[in-house]
Image (spheres, rainbow, N blue to C red):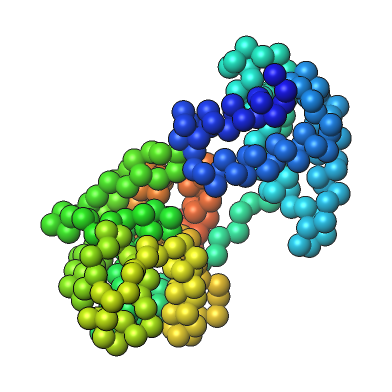
Amino acid sequence: MTIEEWKRQFLEYTEIERGRAVKTIENYDHYLSRFFDQMAIKGPNDITEEKVREFRLWLNRQPGVAGSMKRRTQNYYLIALRAFLKFLRKRGQESLSPEVIELAKVPERHLDLISPAELDRLLAATDGADVKSLRDKAILELLFSTGLRVSELCSLDVDLDLTRDDFPIRGKGDKVRVVFLSDEAKDAIRKYLKARKDMDEALFVNMPPMASKDPEKVSKKTPTRLTPRSVERMIKIYAAKAGITKKVTPHVMRHSFATDLLNNGADIRSVQQLLGHASIVTTQIYTHVTDAHLREVHKKFHSKRRS
């Protein structure tokens, strides 16, 4: 088979059997195609250590936002290639060993965070009584209560059971986890649903301009499921209204959810499960935000005998 045929089989396997998102498949296709084109790969046996090394040098010399391409971005290409090589080995096809490919070391991830006071202002910024404001209030309360990814939030339907304090959500890798609803989130969702007049199955829908003043007019329009991009724009508007100068996104709300748990004594393993992280390493990026709390503990309890 040609390398393109192998790639097609790999992408189908990754989507169907591994349950990866369509966006992930598109990215893998892009990364692999660029490698194959740049290194003139025609078949699995053409993939060698030397060609991988040359490709890494080429990537490192590609222009980026600030100089060369970021190492984190370069690693995305290598992750896709390593997954492809593992697939070839699983199929009994000889090629380069995936263990040969090592990822570049990247600097520690910087978390965009807002303070508890800023979070309170953001949640209070959705103070309107119209259906759009009630929708936005429900979205913000739900994001902070559950730590949902924005794509997960947009996938929710109106059949969400508000008599319970929890519900299952299917996240990355088609894995199901349980998230929990605060009383504030449930109350906000109930008020929003009561104000809605359409019959769309999506929990969060776009509102026509005139619908914010007259909910009855929503039924005259065809509502559409809210997209992640729409949620991002909405949060940006409320952050500005709340006087927050930092960049605030749905993922910042997820960060706030995680750091709130850790700062109040939750253990890292539980936070990992609530966030739906496959690896504890991913969750550990949040642990440094508790340094301020640890500093207070050290100051309060260390070396009291010397006082």
**Residue at screen point 18% across, 55% down:** 161
Name the residue: 43% across, 59% down: 150
Query: What residue lies at 50% left-to-right and 35% top-to-bottom?
Result: 15
> In which quadrant is the C terminus drawn?
bottom left
Q: Is residue 156 visible?
A: yes
Marks counted in the figure total 0
Tell me: 11 left or right of 103: left
Position of the N terminus, as image quadrant, is top right
Above or below, 170 against 262 in this view is above
**Residue 301 spot, x, y in % from top left:** 41, 57
Q: In this view, does 229 lie to the left or right of 138?
A: right
Q: Looking at the picture, does residue 182 appear above or below residue 267?
A: below
Q: Residue furthest bottom?
A: 213
Q: In this view, does 129 lie above or below 197?
A: below
- Is residue 10 shown above or below 216? above
Residue lying furthest left in this view?
163
Residue beneath the point at 34% across and 40% down? 176
Q: Is residue 12 left or right of residue 7?
A: left
